[in-house]
Amino acid sequence: MLDEIVSHLDGILHEDWTGSDAATNGLQVENSGDVSRVAFAVDAATQTVELAAERGADMLVVHHGLFWGGTDAVVGQTYDRIRGLVENDIALYASHLPLDAHESFGNNALLLDELGATPTERFGEFGGAEVGFVGELGTALPYDDFVGNVADTVDNEPVTLDFGPDEVERVAVLTGAGGGQVAEAAETGADVYITGEPKHRAHHDAREHGMNVIFGGHYHTETFGVRSLRREIDASFYIDAFYIDVPTEV
């Protein structure tokens, strides 16, 4: 069953991905091959692995995996995480930028959809491929109301930079660590830019471009993709699939 699930996920997420990525995308740690329960989470952290093991998972699917640009030694924190997987016979599958960028299962497209915006164009180049989306609301909303909608959607109180229009109709989204792309988002003509965590430069970039920016939290803006994959695996394989919610402060 492991091979079938991996093949299915690879076909959805990675066959059409044309960019590069610091992360290793796909199967990162295999198991014995048997899968009857699949856990989904944002991060392949020790806590997440432990919770997956407690609930009897044979496979863990995450957005942030273990391997970023090569691993020279399996020691310390990396060893602890891998040990938990191996001792409990849990396979690990990860999808980073391909999951952010996906038109149907991706964090950016799904966040726009949850906010009632229709994606119209791409922006935000990483690794030679555009990852973010720009979308249009059907009706313009007061900016303060829109901030409240974002807070409800990501289940987190956002940090905002309020330098843009008082009404929102055009929305740019680049989830996670998109604090350095404020100027690029402004070039799309968006009234507001939603991302996960800020960078120091974001304040002046937003002010100088007359841009509203909403930082919803790295974790909180990136739960949508893995949740959608959970529903896909549940429907395609009729297998027990569940989401592990381990929010972080950023």
Image: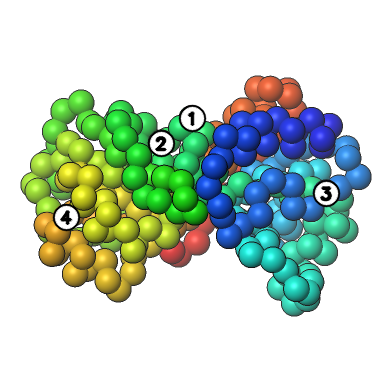
Given the image, on which type of amino acid does mark 3 rest?
Glu
Q: Which mark is residue 211?
A: 4
Residue visible at 56% across and 52% down? 20
Q: Which mark is residue 104?
A: 1
Question: Label 4, label 1: how many angstroms apart (C-alpha)?
Answer: 27 Å
Splitting the image into 4 quarters, where does residue 145 fall? Answer: top left
Residue visible at 21% across and 65% down? 205
Question: Label 2, label 1: how many angstroms apart (C-alpha)?
Answer: 7 Å
> Which of 6 and 153 lies nearest the eye of the viewer?
6
In the rendered view of the protein, which quadrant contains the C terminus?
Answer: bottom left
Q: Secondary structure at mark 4?
A: loop
Question: Label 3, label 4: how many angstroms apart (C-alpha)?
Answer: 45 Å
Where residue 220 appears, x then y in whole percent? 44, 52
State yes or no: discs 3 and 4 in contact (Cβ < 8 Å): no
State yes or no: discs 2 and 1 in contact (Cβ < 8 Å): yes
Counting residues from the N terminus, which is met first, the one under dot 2 or under dot 1?
1
- For disc 3, the marked residue is 30
Relative horizontal placement of residue 169, taking residue 51 as reference (left or right): left
Counting residues from the N terminus, which is met first, the one under dot 1 or under dot 3?
3
Given the image, on which type of amino acid does mark 4 rest?
Met
Q: Which mark is residue 109?
A: 2
Q: Is residue 156 visible?
A: no
Given the image, on which type of amino acid does mark 1 rest?
Ser
